[in-house]
Amino acid sequence: MFFEKKSSVFALFFLFLILLLQIFSRLFSRFMPINPPIWTEELARWTYVWMVGLALGELERSDANLKVTILYDWFPKKMKIVLDWIFDVFWFGFSTFILFIAFKEVMRNLATSATILPMPRACFYAAFLVGFIFTLIRIGERMIRRLKGTDRIQLEKEN
């Protein structure tokens, strides 16, 4: 259970450390008479995209997405429950649509290589594929918890 909850956080932390090392190496190389390898720029971009992709699922798991709740807070509790279901169904549908687009992009870019790094460009687009798979799993888990009546966020809203 611990690994399931924290594995994405560890992966994000590891990617963040890689990104920091890349940025600092580029920064220090500007003040030294050496030219940094050109691939570090592309690797930094890929690392950042993968961080965003993996963070999608983690934000869904912890229900920490940025939300504007000014109007939502005015509704009664029963209406909030209905709105939560509407939002989740919409978000699930939108995530499914983006997942389909990401899958098509991964398939389309399997044969093309990255600009500098020796790997298929599909690895870049796979970040969105993986991120939205995790997002769909987390939304599905939350919907199942709501059906069972054990959703932590929903219980906090009712009290």
Image: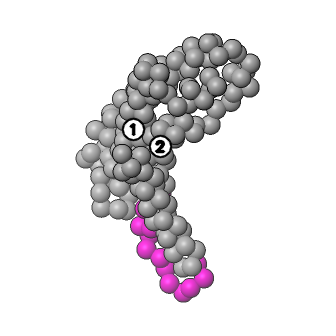
Q: Which mark is residue 58?
A: 2
Question: Residue 155 appears in which quarter of the rendering?
Answer: top right
Task: Return the residue found at the far front.
Answer: 159
Q: Position of residue 48 (x, y in %)?
A: 49, 54
Q: Which mark is residue 134?
A: 1
- Residue at figure coordinates x 45%, y 40% from the top left: 57
Q: Position of residue 14 (x, y in %)?
A: 43, 61
Q: Are marks 2 and 1 in contact (CB under 8 Å)?
A: yes
Point out the image quarter for the C terminus: top right
Q: Position of residue 61 (x, y in %)?
A: 47, 38
Q: Position of residue 30 (x, y in %)?
A: 58, 78
Dot 2: within a 10 Å radius of its alpha carbon, few (fewer than 14), some, or many (20 or more) residues? Answer: many
Left or right of residue 122, residue 53 in this image: right
Q: Which residues are magenta?
A: 30-45
Dot 1: within a 10 Å radius of its alpha carbon, few (fewer than 14), some, or many (20 or more) residues? Answer: many
On whether residue 43 falls in the magenta region, the answer is yes
Question: Marks 2 and 1, Cα distance to the nearest angstrom?
Answer: 8 Å
Looking at the image, residue 20 lies above or below residue 128: below
Q: Nearer the viewer, residue 125 or 10?
A: 10
